[in-house]
Every structure is written in C-alpha cells, then in structure tokens.
Image (tube, rainbow, N blue to C red):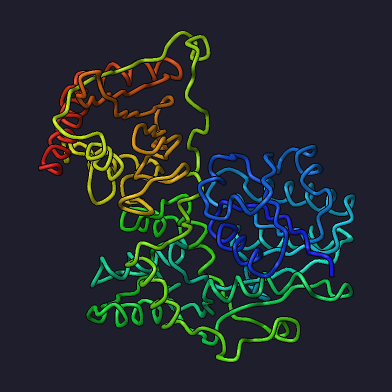
Amino acid sequence: MSTTRSLVTGATGYVGGRLVPQLLEAGHAVRVLVRDERKARTHVWSDDVEIAVGDATKTDDVRAAMQGVDVLYYLLHSIGTGGDFGATEKDMAQRCAEEAKRAGVRRIVYLGGMIPQDEELSEHLSSRGEVGDVLLASGVPTTVLQAGVVIGSGSASFEMLRYLTERLPVMITPKWVNTRIQPIAVRDVLRYLVGSADMPADVSRRFDIGGPEVLTYLDLMQRFAAISGLPRRRILKVPLLTPGLSSHWIGLITPVPASLARPLVESLRNTVVAADTDIAAYVPDPPEGLIDFDRSVELALTKIQDLDVPTSWSSAATAGAPAEGLPTDPDWAGGSLYKDERIREVDASPEHLWQVIEGIGGRNGWYSWRLAWRVRGVLDRMVGGPGLRRGRRNPRDLVVGDAVDFWRVEETDDHSFLRLRAEMRLPGLAWLEMQVGSTDGGTTTFHHRALFHPKGLLGHLYWWSVWPFHGIVFGSMQRNIAEAAESLQQ
C-alpha cells in the first residue's frame, strides 16, 4: 500500500502546527509550504517532514509545492490582516485550486466556518464560504469542514473567552451573547481533518462539524467560570455595543488585538449550529463520543498550566506588522539606521545571564520603567497594535516566530543571542538585540542594542523624540537584567 503524501499549507499556524504530527502518526508523508523555514524548524516535527519554502500568493511557489502530492490541506486565511482580506483569501484559494488540479492532487481538505442559512453573514464567514466555493469548483474532490467555535489551548476564540471571563466578574455585553453556537474541541477538529484524507473520490461537499452541545456565548462564559472555580459572572446585556466597539473593548481586556477580535465578534452574531451530522458516515465518532465543552476547557487549561501549548493564535503576525528582516547594509535603510548600543560586564555566568534574557517579557516584564512600558502598550492597542497583553507562549523558552508582547522573535542562538522585531505600530522598523559574550579573562559581557529604521520625516521625529528616554528605559533594562542574573547565580 503506497503512502499518502500530504501537503499542509499554514503549517506554522494554530491548526496546521497541530495537524502535522497527527498526519505523521497516521502514516502520511508530509510536505509543508511555509514562507519562513526558520519558523518551521522550531517545531518538533520539522525533521520528519519535507519543507517547501514559498509564498501562496506566488504561482511558481505553489506549483512546485504541489508536485507529487495526493492530499492538499488548505489552512490559509487572512483574518485580521486588515483591508480587503476576503479578496486576498479568494485569490490564494483560486491559485491553489488551479495548481492542485494541474498536479493531479486527488483530494483537497479545507477547514472553514459554519455557514448559517437565511442570515446576513459576517465578512469573515462570508469569506470562508467563498473560499470553500472556489475549492469545490476546482475539479478536485474536496472536503470542506465547517467548524463552530474551536476550543483549545492557544486558540484565539478560547483566549478571548478565557480572559473575558477571568478578568470581568461583572460584564456589560452586547446581544450576541445569546447567539446559539456549537463549540468543538480542537482534538475533534484534528481527527476530522486526518480522517477526511480517505474519503471516497465521489464525495465532494461541505460537512458541518461541531461538538455534542449547542450553547450560547453566555453559557460558555458561565460554564468556564464554574470550571475555573470562579464565582458566577454577572451579565448586563445592552443593544448599543456594536461589533466595532465590542472588538476594541476585547482588545483592551484580552490579549487578542482588535484587528483579530472584530471578525471573531462579527461572526458571533450568526447562529453556528451544525445542520447535519453526515460527517460521521466517513469519519466515525470515537467510542467515547465527541468531547463536550466542559472537557475541552479542562484539557485546554491543563495544557496551559503544564506549559505545553504547541501552537497559538499569536503564531501569526499581527495585522500591519512589519516582516522585513534586519538590514545589514546602511544603504538599504536609505542611509538612516539609528542605534542605541550598550555593553556591560556582569558578575554572573553566561548561562545565568541567558536564563534571565530568555525569560523576558510576559509576566516577567521588561526589567525597566514599568509604567512607561504599560503606557506604551496601551497606546499601541488603541491604534490597533498587539500591545503587551499578548504575552508569551512559554515563560522560559523562546523559538523563532514566538510572540513576546509587542515583539516577535526574529532570531535566537540558544544561550548567546536574541533578536526581537517590533510589531507595535511605529513610523518605521525597530529591533531589540541582546547578546551574551565573554572576555579572555572569563568575564561575562552583556551587549544590548536597539535599532530603528525610520520611514519618512515622522520616523526621524519619532526617534529623536524618544531618544532622551533611552537612558532610563534601555539603560535601566540592561542594568536590572544584569542584577537579576547576578542574584540568580547567588
């Protein structure tokens, strides 16, 4: 029996990163299409897959990745990227559909959202439906899985629910809290995805997938509170909170930025209840049945408590965040690359210094003027950036691609070097570097460098307006990190 070769797009995203090991366990030969190979290499499965580096918006890259593929897992989306994300999603789907047909792919498997009948759809759900239409029209047998709200550690929907419930004992909420939804555990989503690869060739259609219960969002919050040992939440429903206002409120209270929260909130106004359970004829339920909401929350919270969250919604870059790498030639920066460099000797081993550096951000903070960092985080969220609430995937370990508050790990050399790229809203590009070294005499050195490439006059004005504060912010940051390392060694 020949091995199924599967191509997973979006493999470094929330679902894709979890699907790959499930496919490997099921005996598939897996190829992943990624834009950044370094990000893929941070996953435990990277040595067991074929990595194709390319961009789904480029035909040549997609065509090369499709060669010899049996099953295409289409997990791409542009939610939260701003602008006309629907047109971007449709264009990518059309390109992948055409190249899958050209390459002789025998099945496409796509994960979208439930499409309610006779309701005005949110822009997000409408786009999900159009992508499904494009793939179904490809001429390749296609399985379109339409899921309800996905509950799992690290999912945007779960984090939104979790933080709203934990932080607000009393909530003023819009009327969408009464919308009926059918949440589904991420484990069941993955089981359906893997099982869909073996559907008969004459099956090409949509399937609704949901958990065993139909609840309202209000039910979800109250049951989450009970599972977490919190008092019952007090809810005051008002009709005045629009999706726009709700998304900005969620952006301030939860780690999910308003740019991502808005399409999620707008989708909550639609009833998302499975119209059928036909999927069971092709991917049977497990003997113990589907995972209910309470159990899915318990599993998610256990993963979080055990620091075992393999993928997160924050794996995807924030809308509008820069993607350019650090310039190595000043000419690239138009002759302007501002730097703030500091070197300090530290009375601690390189290992202890690195331990403090690698734990920076999140709950540990930034080891300097705490109020200034908080204010900067709030201002960033007010203009649509991620702010400081995004936190970290793991409090002790960093890999390329990890989000760290309003930064993202661009490069790390374990125990010696860390480069963070800013994803806050700025009139330019910014990086923060921390490097551990040593002298011939055995002294540990701490090299701290902030870099800024301005865009236009506003960028230059921004740098010089904050430059007087660098001594307070970056100077104290370096000093406090050094002192924390010295204390740790003692």
Q: Residue at x 52, y 85 (%)?
A: 214
Quarter of the image with the N terminus is bottom right
Residue 138 vertical position relative to residue 166 in the rendered view, above or below: above
Quarter of the image with the C terminus is top left
Q: Residue at x 80, y 66 (%)?
A: 142
Left/right placement of residue 242 relative to residue 488 reads: right
Residue 245 vertical position relative to residue 292 in the rendered view, above or below: above
**Residue 354 occupies which quadrant of the picture?**
top left
Find residue 343 and report its horizontal and vertical position in percent: 23, 20
Q: Residue at x 34, y 29 (%)?
A: 432
Residue 426 vertical position relative to residue 407 in the rendered view, above or below: above
For the residue pair 460 and 174, the one nearer the viewer reads as 460
Find residue 485 and report its horizontal and vertical position in percent: 17, 38
Count all numbered tags in the image, as a single digit.
0
**Residue 351 occupies which quadrant of the picture?**
top left
Left/right placement of residue 67 relative to residue 269 reads: right
Q: Residue at x 74, y 38 (%)?
A: 58
For the residue pair 250 and 283, the one nearer the viewer reads as 283
Find residue 174 and report its horizontal and vertical position in percent: 39, 69
Left/right placement of residue 434 relative to residue 321 reads: left
Residue 482 vertical position relative to residue 225 in the rendered view, above or below: above
**Residue 352 occupies which quadrant of the picture?**
top left
Find residue 420 and report its horizontal and vertical position in percent: 39, 34
Left/right placement of residue 186 relative to residue 218 reads: right
Quick one: which residue is furthest to the front in this view?
A: 441
